[in-house]
Amino acid sequence: MTASESPDPAAKSNRTIVHVDMDAFYAAVEELDHPEYRGQPLIIGADPKGGQGRGVVSTCNYIARKFGVHSAQPVSQAYRLCPQGIFIPPAYARYSELSKAIMKILQSFSPTVEQVSIDEAFLDCTGTERLFGQAPELGQRIKDTIRAETGLTASVGIAPNKYIAKVASDLEKPDGLTICAPGREREFLGRLPVERLWGAGKKTVLKLKTCGYWQIGDLAKAELGEVRKALGNHGEHFWRLAKGLDDRPVRTGWRRKSISEETTFEHDVDDNDRLEQVLYKIAETLTRNLRREDARGRTVVLKIRLTGFETFTRSKTVPEPTDETKTIRETALQMFRAFDRRGKAVRLIGIGVSNLLFADDPDPVQKKAARISQMDLFGDLSQSSGQDSGEHSAGHPGDKRDRSERRRDELLDDLKDKFGNHIKRGSLL
Ligand SMILES: [Mg+2]
């Protein structure tokens, strides 16, 4: 897939960027398909098992939110808050079917649609005024078309750039339409809390507040040097966002940025051998999915949730983008062994891979990958395993993997496709 950029990159500040975000998407689809759920608190996620369930809430409708239920919450807690709620497992196939229908509708408004999740997309609608009208009319048309063709409501934000469009779509949810006119960027963002800075995690927010920046406007007025002192390398990025500056183009196509796989235990697990076995299995499933998508990643993330729901992540970047089971497994195991649980048992464990690179990625990424590969031929390879040759297999940028390791992974993938998941790596080695 080739990524294409916004029609006129020169006229960046005069762009019309639309962010469309479906309202409580999974829950809305369920209410559409099951009218009997309407008007009741609806919670989609793991089985609550009468309050003993171990998983988390995936999403819930707005009525359930009034009880304090929210996504990523332990389902047992959701059950305590709202025992009368309807709890159902997610039906992903149905959600993805409607997602495709919605993306098709969006493509009728612009050829430049960037899907960012199952129910969310950016559109570059610069220059479509004659066809669809000014921002308010355009936004209303998009919402009306989605409603008429799917029965679902969307919230829409329209602004001169992606960041503000994203903030805008969230401000008047559900069924919202929020517009930031060109030239009004700083005014629009000024009074919003710094939590609204896109990409600012808890740590960044805390640092900002410690320095007295509570509202985005406080940060916009600050000297860049001061912000750099507070936030280090990321300072300039957030300072620019605060000023309403964001010239990232809308890119067509959907590229996931990461992939992950995790297991929640029925009972918390303390035994290291058992945990390592589970990590082993997770690494196999995860890398098989990577290979299926023809993707490779450079950053391996270990996620551990302990008794009491405290959650930690550890990450490590490997020198080569990889989809190799062994490399990803060993990297995750290293981080697991170095992690101090302070005697606490494990509730959930998982592995993720981010900084993904795809075989058909456009040039700039390929060049970067090739450069990394060149450097590593002469550098330290201690992080990669089994590098006995510098061979490049066709297709993937920056490829330099052990041939036998690749063959082993592929053979195992084939066997699993044919005979199912009980095929174990050990039986091949
Ligand atoms: Mg949504």
Image: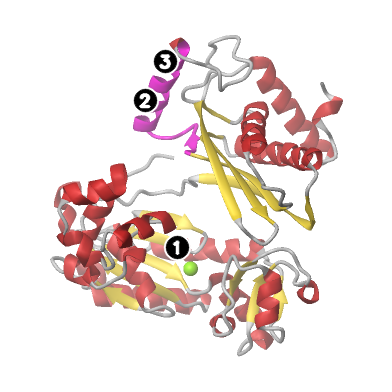
Task: Judge by depth and name the residue closer to the eye, 78 or 246.
Answer: 78
The quarter holding residue 210 reads bottom left
Residue underneath mark 3: 374
Nearer-N-terminus badge (2/1): 1
Q: Position of residue 86 (x, y in %)?
A: 70, 81
Bin the neighbour count of mark 2 within 10 Å (Cα to Cα): few under 14, some 14-19, many 20 and up.
few
User: Where residue 367 is drawn, which disc sits there?
Assistant: 2
The quarter holding residue 212 reads bottom left
Q: Position of residue 411 (x, y in %)?
A: 75, 26
Quote the CA–CA distance across marks 3 and 1: 38 Å
Residue drawn 36% across the image and 25% down it? 367
Visible residue check, residue 5: no
Assign a secondary structure to mark 3.
helix
Quote the CA–CA distance across marks 2 and 1: 30 Å
Nearer-N-terminus badge (2/3): 2
Nearer-N-terminus badge (3/1): 1
